[in-house]
Image (cartoon, helix red, strand yellow):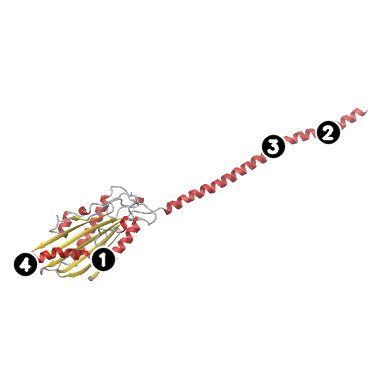
C-alpha cells in the first residue's frame, strides 16, 4: 500500500530533474546566442571604430591632395634666340638677323634671354636704329610658395608695373594684347637721349607658368624721322604671340593638366619637379625696362659718328 505512494513521490522529483536538465542546454544556447550577439556587437563596434579611423585617413588623403599644389604646365623653355622666325626678325630688326646675342644663364630650363640690334645707316640722310630683347622666365609649382601659374602671375604684374614707372619716360601708355597667352600687356613710352628720342615698347606676357618680357625700341638718328609708336607696338605684340607659340612648342606634344587646350594652339606637357622655383623668382638676365634705351645708345653713337 505504501509503494504506490513512494512512486508518486518520486515522479515529481524525476520530472523536476528532467526539466532542469532540459533547461541547462537551453541556458547554454541562450548564453551562446548572447555571447555571439555580444561578439557581433563588439565586432561591429570594432569595425565601427576602424571605419572612422579608415575614414579619417581617407579624409586626410583628399586634404593632402587639396593642399598639394597643381603641377606646372610647362616643364622647359625654348632657346630664346630661336623663338622668332626670320620673317618676324626681318620686320623688327631688318639689319640685325645675324646679330642675335644670348644672355648668360646657368639654368636654361628656367630662364634665358636673347637680344638683336639693327642699324640702317643712310649716311647724311640719317639712320634707323632698332633694338629687340626677349626674356623668358619659368616658374615651378612649389608646396611652400604656391602654384607655378600664380607665381608667374605675380611676376607678370611686377614686370608690367616696372615698365609703367620707368624714370624719365614721357607719353607713357599701356593696353592689353589680345590673343597672347593668358595675360598680356603692352607698355609704350618715349625716352629722350642725346642721340635722339627712343620709342620704347615693352610687352609682358604670361602663358601658364612662363613669363615673357619683350623689349623693343626704335629711333631715327642723325636727323632721320622717328618711327611710329603704333607700328612698333603692333610689331612687338605680334612677336610676343610668336614667342608664346614657341614656348608651347618647346614642351612635348600632349594634353595639359585636366585636358585644357593650349591657348597658343599648341599642346603642352605637364611635368616638372619644383626644385628650381626659388631660383626662378629673381631673374638675373632679364633686363630692366629702362635698359633698352641705354643699351641702344652705343650703336646710335657709332651711327652719329658715321654720319
| Label 2 secondary element | helix
Indicate which label's residue lies in the foreground, 3 or 4.
4
Indicate which label's residue lies in the foreground, 4 or 2.
4
**Residue 223 vertical position relative to residue 280 in the rendered view, above or below:** below
Q: Which residue is mark 2?
A: 13
**Residue 217 vertical position relative to residue 61 in the rendered view, above or below:** below
Category of crowding for the residue at label 3, using alpha-carbon neighbours closer than 10 angstroms: few (below 14), some (14–19), many (at least 20): few
In percent of the image, x 75 and y 34: which residue is there?
A: 22
Q: CA distance from mark 3 to mark 1?
A: 90 Å
Q: CA distance from mark 4 to mark 2?
A: 144 Å
Indicate which label's residue lies in the foreground, 2 or 1.
1
Residue 29's tag is 3
Residue 44 appearing in the image: yes
In percent of the image, x 90 and y 31: which residue is there?
A: 5
Screen quadrant of the N terminus: top right
Q: Which residue is mark 4?
A: 124
| Label 1 secondary element | helix
Amino acid at each position: 500500500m505504501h509503494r504506490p505512494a513512494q512512486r508518486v513521490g518520486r515522479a515529481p522529483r524525476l520530472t523536476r530533474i528532467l526539466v532542469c536538465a532540459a533547461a541547462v542546454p537551453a541556458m547554454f544556447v541562450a548564453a551562446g546566442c548572447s555571447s555571439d550577439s555580444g561578439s557581433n556587437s563588439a565586432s561591429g563596434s570594432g569595425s565601427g571604430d576602424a571605419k572612422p579611423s579608415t575614414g579619417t585617413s581617407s579624409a586626410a588623403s583628399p586634404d593632402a591632395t587639396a593642399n598639394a599644389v597643381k603641377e606646372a604646365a610647362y616643364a622647359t623653355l625654348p632657346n630664346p634666340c630661336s623663338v622668332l622666325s626670320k620673317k618676324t626678325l626681318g620686320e623688327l630688326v631688318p639689319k640685325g638677323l645675324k646679330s642675335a646675342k644670348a644672355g648668360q644663364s646657368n639654368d636654361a630650363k628656367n630662364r634665358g634671354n636673347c637680344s638683336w640690334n639693327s642699324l640702317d645707316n643712310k649716311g647724311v640722310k640719317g639712320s634707323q636704329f632698332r633694338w629687340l630683347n626677349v626674356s623668358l622666365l619659368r616658374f615651378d609649382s612649389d608646396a611652400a610658395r604656391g602654384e607655378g601659374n600664380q607665381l608667374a602671375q605675380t611676376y607678370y604684374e611686377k614686370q608690367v608695373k616696372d615698365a609703367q614707372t620707368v624714370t624719365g619716360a614721357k607719353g607713357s601708355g599701356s593696353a592689353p594684347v589680345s590673343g597672347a597667352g593668358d595675360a598680356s600687356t603692352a607698355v609704350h613710352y618715349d625716352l629722350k637721349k642725346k642721340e635722339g628720342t627712343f620709342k620704347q615698347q615693352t610687352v609682358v606676357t604670361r602663358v601658364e607658368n612662363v613669363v615673357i618680357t619683350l623689349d623693343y625700341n626704335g629711333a631715327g638718328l642723325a636727323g632721320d624721322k622717328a618711327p611710329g609708336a603704333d607700328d612698333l607696338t603692333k610689331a612687338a605684340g605680334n612677336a610676343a604671340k610668336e614667342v608664346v607659340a614657341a614656348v608651347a612648342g618647346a614642351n612635348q606634344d600632349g594634353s595639359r593638366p585636366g585636358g585644357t587646350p593650349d591657348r597658343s594652339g599648341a599642346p603642352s606637357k605637364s611635368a616638372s619637379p619644383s626644385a628650381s622655383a626659388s631660383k626662378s623668382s629673381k631673374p638675373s638676365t632679364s633686363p630692366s625696362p629702362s635698359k633698352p634705351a641705354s643699351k641702344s645708345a652705343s650703336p646710335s653713337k657709332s651711327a652719329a659718328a658715321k654720319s
